[in-house]
Amino acid sequence: MQWASRHGMPREARCERLTAVPQVGRLIEIDMAFPDNLGTIACTCVVRERKPVLFVSHAGGDWQMYCHWRNHDFADPQVLRNELVAVHIAHLVALDPTLEDVADLPTDMGAERERVGGPWERYEDKDD
């Protein structure tokens, strides 16, 4: 694993890893602020249909990224079984680098936006 610093700071001040991500049979390297071993729960709309991530949650310390929470009935066990998948964060960052804007989202916070590139509105988002 290679180390890089996007802002010219020494490694001790700001560590970022270049993460290899498989994309259609090849590897690409992504310089990202998220930890290189981070998994997230995402909806199949984002992962398979390539819809944009408009909602991010870090509730309870778990990362979740969805096209939007309003689009899924999370109380329905079928939705949980059929519409949610675990994915490495680098796959989503490769599709949308603006997700890096919420890499600093603290635990028990959420963020949403109206469109890719739009401002993230942050708010408290604790698990029930």
Image (cartoon, rainbow, N blue to C red):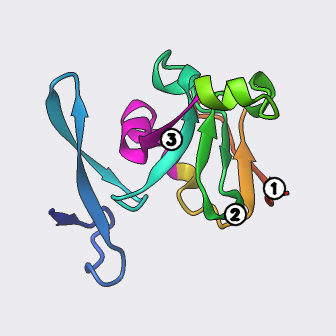
Q: Which residue is mark 3?
A: 98
Q: Rounded to the nearest whole Å, what is the CA distance between mark 3 and mark 2?
A: 23 Å
Q: Earlier in the sequence, mark 3 or mark 2?
A: 2
Q: SS class of the residue under badge 2?
A: helix
Please state the horizontal and vertical placement of residue 56, each as a whole percent of the image.
65, 45
Image marks 1 and 2: residues in contact by CB distance under 8 Å: no
Q: Which mark is residue 60?
A: 2
Name the kind of residue labelled 2 in the image.
Gly
Q: Quadrant of the N terminus?
A: bottom left
Q: Start and end of the magenta stretch? A: 84-100
Please state the horizontal and vertical placement of residue 24, each as a whole percent of the image.
22, 22
Q: Which residue is mark 1?
A: 123
> Was residue 91 drawn as part of the magenta stretch in this picture?
yes
Please state the horizontal and vertical placement of residue 117, each as a whole percent of the image.
58, 34
Nearer to us in this view, 58 or 104? 58
Residue under the point 65% across and 57% down: 58
Q: Earlier in the sequence, mark 3 or mark 1?
A: 3
Above or below 93: residue 80: above
Q: SS class of the residue under badge 1?
A: strand
Residue under the point 57% across and 63% down: 104
Please state the horizontal and vertical placement of residue 108, each as a whole percent of the image.
74, 63
